[in-house]
Amino acid sequence: MSEINQDELQKIWRSVLIGVELQIPKASFATWLKYSELIDKKDGVAYVSLPNNFTKAWVENKYNKILLGGVRLIDDSTKNIKFVVKSVKPKELFEYAKTSAPTLDNSNEKQLVFAEFKIDPNTNLNPKYSLSSFVVGSSNELAYAATQGVISDIGKKYNPLFIYGGVGLGKTHLMQGAGNEIKRMYNDQIRVKYVSSEKFTSDIISGIKAKRMEDVKRKYRDIDVLIIDDIQFIAGKEKTEMEFFNTFNALYEVNKQIIISSDRPPKAIPILEERLRSRFEGGMVVDVLPPDYEMRVAIIKTKLQQKNKEIPDSVIEIIANKVRKNIRELEGIVNIILFYKEQKGLEITPALAEDIIRKNTQHTPENITPQQIIKSVANFFQILVDDLMGTCRKKEFVKPRQVAIYLLRDMLELSYPYIGELVGKKDHTTAIHSYEKVNKEINTNNDLNQKIILIKDIINKSEE
Amino acid sequence: MSFIVLRNNLKEALLITERGLGENANLPILKSLSFKINKEGVFISSTNLEIGITTNCSAKIINEDKFLIQSNIISSLIANIPSERLDIKKINNLLEVKSDNYEATIPILSPEDFPIIPEIENKNKYLEINGNIFTEALTQVVQAVQFSEIRPEISGVYLNFDLEIITLVGTDSFRLAEKKIKNTNFKTNYEEGFKCIIPLKTIQECIRIFKKNEVIKLYFDENQFLIKNNQTKLISRLIEGNFPDYKAIIPKGFETEIEVDRNEFINALKFVGSSNQLINEVKIIVHEEKKFFEIQSTERSSGKFKTIIPAKIKGKNNEIIFNWRYIIDGVKNIQNNTITFILNSNTKPALISLEDSLYLYLLMPIKQ
């Protein structure tokens, strides 16, 4: 950057143009110089941008002298003018395009558009994510507050911001929302770029392949806010990690903001290079947890509001109660229920809702055995299977036992007497009591809810 | 005497350059053609400040000279003069066009006011390709492009060159066409790949001018490009911006695959489409395990049109509404007798492609 700021350059250029306007015909001025701009001035050279090569060729040949004379009147240290091509979006054209009917408009409103094309090609941000539609609750308020901090004080307060949490908990929403907010607040003055780590990797690879690595580097270093999603995927890809590390440093050193997400905290990403890990931990590390019951209700209500749809409160409660895993699943169920309501014209009763949820969330593979569940629970709590199935009422055994009962019922829908039998010849009332206790508790105890989600994951994975 | 020219040669040169003329209230000069006569020939140029076209009209040169003529005057003159051989001569600020028994004197303008057509900076690196192959490829993708002031980055054809393949892509965000040209069809001395977006109007002019069985060369700068054959060169600005990441929308799998005879498919679409000239909608109904599929009209007020077409069906049942003109645009670009039409639910893009994957065409359904 030059030492002269943009305002000053603009001022100089305006007074140069006023002088030139008097010397050449009005039509010529309008054609050739209207969109010219002084973009920099250093070492005796003034850099003037023009909208295209035709204008450049003409101005260079015809008006170089007049313009140089004009600049020298203000600053006689200028010896030379260099013209560069920089396409501008003329304001008038832009305004016009907004008000007049778009040419691209199809007469048929129902014609669908490629969804990905709604994404802003310069920032890769999807405008559908906004912070105002982000539901804040106890499980994500820290992440939300940190994001707000970043927006208000870009590059300084929390840099890098590292957000981690399981799938479908709103990390992408939060990051893209932040990007969109920054874009809006700073009127596109701040260059934001959102990339998934796959995109980053494939850019690096194609850069190497096409021998255009310099372009790739420039592309990533020429931004003010870099948002990278799912960073865990670059771990172990040496060249990408190295390039990311370099990009990270290049941006970090000049106080550019970096926002990163991952499905786990930096220290839990295996094979991530140590130097990268320590960089990540040097900023702000925040987590997002699965939403609690109240938040799930709030999320469902927000989604319905966005779609301008309604479903009865009793049904909302059932959804919030039954669908705990993540927000994406929650959204999916709401969509399916709306589909039943609108396309099939059914009245959504609590019973129907339960039925729909059961059908659509039952991803438990069929050949999971009760033994597998018991073993996984025991492993998770690091106790022996025998202790879990035993009669000891120590706290460290009782909780796993209850969880195992809950999972046997929830995942396999076994009968209570059978479950009682499985966990060491207990009475069926014990099984009922345990199931209900856990079922209730997961709505209030987030820690337990998370543990159960994790155990389910482990069980499902061991199946695969 | 300036030069002697055959009427047809001049007429052809005028036809090539006329399309590059501009409309600009501030710059009426853009409606004129520039004539430069030197030892090498008569060079006629036009520009609208987005593209510049220069063509060499073969003629017998008498004197070097240069001048501007208003395009409409010279064109109607040449169109109506029946003589084959024309003697053309500049006298002060008039031009005399003369044959055995016809004679016209028309006003000319000073050549100084004509815009300077920029030169390409990169004069060494180029792509060399047959004009027919290149313009044919452009034709296959340009249909899908529409001019949009709001989205300049898709108001043109995206060209991605990676040394081995030239990929051309056009889209209006409702459909997308991609064409690949393999390096067996072109030569290059570029050592690294590049990508750019060529404006729609430039593409249209390229197709018109360079659709000939002769070698053309393409040169690229950062913000302009040059295409030329032995006679004509066209320089154009490029569109600044990033083309959308279109690869993400190419479906990986499919729900339903239809293999159908190309001509039968086109006829069926035209028949059902003729039911209503306004909305262009047709519904495609596929049942698995059947040896045919159905195309129906959607609008009942103009009657009910339907047809059954024999086909090989794989995958599951589907019922999707499309703009039939969009389907035909894609199908027509495939010369095979059989077409593979891949459906992916009523909110996801459908795909028409060739086995060698050198051409593919994606289109979005119409909401039901």
Image: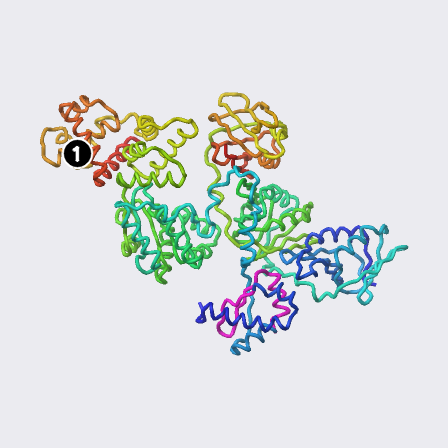
Specify the subunit that label 1 lies on.
A
- Residue B17 point in image, percent of width and height: 71, 54
Task: Specify the quadrant that holds the N terminus of chain B.
Answer: bottom right
The color scheme shown is rainbow
Return the x and y of residue B111 as percentages of the image width and height.
Answer: 72, 65
| Residue at image point 55% right, 42% down | B178
Q: Is residue B36 above or below residue A80?
A: above
Residue located 48% across and 39% down the image: B250
Q: How many marks?
A: 1
- As for residue A412 lying within the magenta part, the answer is no
- Give the extent of the magenta segment: A36-65
Q: Residue at x 82, y 60 (%)?
A: B88
Q: Is residue A159 visible?
A: yes
Left or right? Give the position of B168 relative to A197. Answer: right
Q: Position of residue B228 (x, y in %)?
A: 66, 53
Q: Residues within 10 Å of mark 1 (few under 14, many from 20)?
A: many
Q: Is residue B152 left or right of residue A177?
A: right
**Of residues A382 and A95, the one drawn nearer to the viewer in this rendering:** A95
Which type of secondary structure does the marked residue at label 1 adopt? helix
Q: Which is more toward the observer, A394 or B63?
A: A394
Q: Quadrant of residue A294?
A: top left
* A54 relative to A242 in the view: left or right: right
Amino acid type, label 1: Pro
Horizontal side, residue B93 vs residue B211: left or right: right
Q: Horizontal and vertical percent for residue B230? A: 70, 53
Above-or-below relation of B186 to B221 = above
Q: Which residue is mark 1?
A: A400
Q: Is residue A63 magenta?
A: yes
Q: Is residue B360 visible?
A: no
